[in-house]
Each structure stands twice: as C-alpha cells, then as structure tokens.
Image: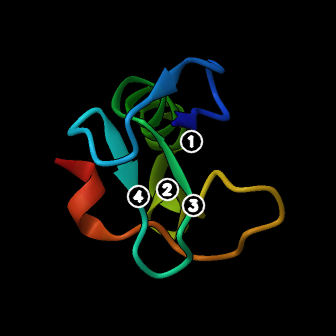
Amino acid sequence: MFECQGCLDEYDPDSEEVISIDSCGHSMCRECYGEYIEVKLSEGPISIKATCSGSKCQMILPDSLYK
C-alpha cells in the first residue's frame, strides 16, 4: 500500500488515484496533488517553476500535472 504524504490515506500504488512524478519517483494522491497545484498556481507566474512536493525535491513539476 502507498500512504499519501499529504492526507496520510492509504492507496493501492497502481491505482489511478495515485499520481507519481516519473523523474523523481515522488507520489501523492490525486486530490492532494490537485490542491498542491492550486496553491502553486495562486502564486502567479512563478508557478511555472513549481517543484515536486517531496521533501527537499527540486524536480520541476511536469506540464502534464496541470491538466
């Protein structure tokens, strides 16, 4: 099982409810990543350089997560 670092709920890691960033391997549930991205977008133009939610991860979020 996968525990989302945002809400601490458990999910099947292969579920469509889990979003993983291929470049760094960090994951969150779809709802938590949606909320994270909304917060980043509210920061304005700097959001194009938003990084992964993983602790100290500097991987820039891929465009595909903004859909």
Towards the viewer: 28 or 49: 28
- Residue at image coords 38%, 23%: 31
The picture places residue 63, in percent across and down from the top left corner, at 27, 67
Q: Badge 4 local density, few (<14 within 10 Å), some, or many (20+)?
A: some
Q: Which mark is residue 26?
A: 3
- What residue is disc 4 on? 20
Label whose residue precedes the other's in the sequence (1 or 4): 4
The picture places residue 19, in percent across and down from the top left corner, at 36, 48
- Residue at image coords 58%, 32%: 4
Q: Contact, CB < 8 Å: mark 2 with mark 1?
A: yes
Cα–Cα span, label 3 and label 2: 19 Å
Tag 1's secondary structure? loop
Cα–Cα span, label 1 and label 4: 23 Å
Label whose residue precedes the other's in the sequence (2 or 4): 4
Label whose residue precedes the other's in the sequence (3 or 4): 4
Looking at this rendering, what residue extends furthest in the left direction?
67
- Residue at image coords 40%, 45%: 13
Q: Contact, CB < 8 Å: mark 1 with mark 4?
A: no
Q: Amino acid at mark 4?
A: Ser
The picture places residue 47, in percent across and down from the top left corner, at 49, 56
Tag in front: 3 or 1: 3
Q: Badge 1 local density, few (<14 within 10 Å), some, or many (20+)?
A: few
- What residue is disc 1 on? 43
